[in-house]
Image (spheres, coloured by chain):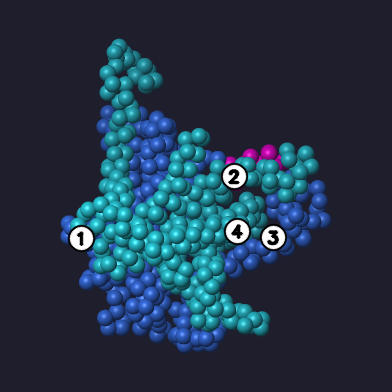
Amino acid sequence: MSTAAAPASAALAPAPVFRPKRFTLGNIGLYAVMGIISLFFLFPIYLIFLIAFTPANYTIYSGRPPLIPPQLTWSNLQTGLTAPNSPFLPSMFLSLEVAFFVGALAILIGIPTAYGLSRLGSRLAYGLTTVLFVVNMLPSITIAVPISVVFIKIGLYGSPISIGLAQELLALPVTVFLLVGAFQGLPRDLENQARVDGAGRMQAIYGNLVPLIVPALVAAFLLAWMLSWDESTFALILYNPATSATLPVNIFLYFTGRGSPVVGVAFSFVATIPVIILTVFLQKYLKGEDLAAGVRG
Amino acid sequence: MALAHRDGLEPAPVATFFERHQDQLIPFLFVLPALVYVGYFAFYPMFQTIVYSFQTPILSFTYYNYQANVQSGLYSWISNTLWLTAGALALQFGLALGVASILNRTFRGKTAFATIAILPIGIATVVAGEVFNQIFPGTGAGYANSILASVGIAPVYWLQHPWLALTVVIIADSWKNTSLVIIILVAGYATIPRTLYQAAAIDGAGALRQFWHVTLPGLRGFIVMALLIRGAQEVNIFQLAYIMISSYPQLLTVQVYLLWESSGGVPYLASAVSTVLLGIVTVFIVVVIVLGGRR
């Protein structure tokens, strides 16, 4: 494999340094591979834009949809967003309400949980982390069905709170893993010092520690927000057809034969823009150790 | 406690249970609300599902929910789900190992490539399903066929054969979820000391042998973890598949949804399929716990 001789890695991996002739070749190979992989990742995103801004008879209603738009239009978005009876506005408000609820709750429960885990003995902390990790692996649809029965019983069915409480199951574990890392990064003496100075434990946590992990808190909030914004299984089982559904659920319904796909296209586009921006913004906080519940090799 | 000594406080001569575990008890109390929450909203519904699966609408015990589903094809739903899981894991790991090993180098444009590789995380599952439905529809149209037509290949009906339909779902799902595996493997790469590669190179190991003898052992914990997380999530794949291939071939999750929906929210029949799903996921969970305990 001559691709191993890429010059860029020469500074770190010494082997190729001795064979300078292979640099260029390996380089071209590497960039070619990256180009193909990038194309694979970018093509569907390009299509989201293409389908949103091209007349539907050149896209979803075409037998041979062209890859370059013959003409551009705003009409798909207009149809989707402003048509009479379009569920767009109520749908977006519900999505926003739920996402902010999930983000806020993730922080509210996440701070004490992460603090507790960072102060527990390693065996107990490991056991409790595993419990949270397992929650992330459970099938949403398995959990959603009995939860819907409970919410119908207590009259919360379809409310933003009921959808948010279910989605929090996905957001809380990741939030907690991220915040545990942040708490562990703080010097232990900070808390001890505050306690010696007469602060209570709560005061030490919220007055002295929390202000130092604000970036991690913002990241955790946005990550939870994003998970909720994109989540569709709980939102599908727990929405009330008589009132409103979240954006992903409406997209799902419009693409499984319950409305015009053009409306679904418009919804998809609008739902996608904020999360693409968030993903780029959150990139450095998306850490493998957090997503894998703190595996360290 | 070191602090107590430094302050000149005498440790209590005979500690009660509470005193001995005080440093553990209070942190535990901080974790408790989260435990109560996941207990009530995740584990209790899980057991509720198992109970429903053995109940009739008048709450008497029955095997009927399982028998009826076996009659309708439960075994084929299981095998479709497992094939999909296996195929998706293979594709995602091949791709993610490649991308992670590229990201392990330093080169011009690395940040841009890393950003591109994680973008799909931000695309909602239903949107990914919709877009891939436009790429691989069952009608002979679609963007994949546009590309094939440009090189003179006749249109493919992507949903004609169950294996072909599963394959396009595997591609779509891998597009959406490989990013997660990449992130985990990149974290793994960061834990492998550079000196190991240097030592291997001095011993005359080429790139392939370095990968086999240094990279793979170094990544093992991360690979196993990522396989288990993705494996469990793969078994739970639902809307992406439903939007793309509807019920042909049928998957466990889609069947749960259809049974639940067609019964107007009556959970009994759906819960039997749910419980089977839970059983498969439990295998992954048990492996996580066993491996974790050994660490």
Q: Nearer the viewer, mark 4 or mark 3?
A: 4
A220 drawn magenta: no
Q: Earlier in the sequence, mark 1 or mark 3?
A: 3
Name the residue tied to disc 1. Answer: A152
Q: CA distance from mark 3 to mark 2?
A: 22 Å
B162 versus A63 height, above or below? above
Q: Between marks 2 and 4, how big is the CA–CA gap?
A: 15 Å
**In which quadrant will I find the N terminus of chain B?**
top left
The hue in which chain B appears in the rendered picture of the protein: cyan
Mark 4 Cα-neighbour bin, 10 Å: few <14, some 14–19, many ≥20: some
Residue type at mark 2 is Leu
Kindly state the secondary structure of the residue where label 1 is placed: helix
Residue A190 % position (x, y)? 38, 33
Q: Identify which residue is drawn at 40% across, 55% down.
A: B277
Rounded to the nearest angstrom, the CA distance separating label 4 from label 3 is: 14 Å
Q: Is residue A134 above or below residue A151?
A: above
Name the N-terminal-most of marks 2 and 4: 4
Q: Residue furthest top?
A: B13
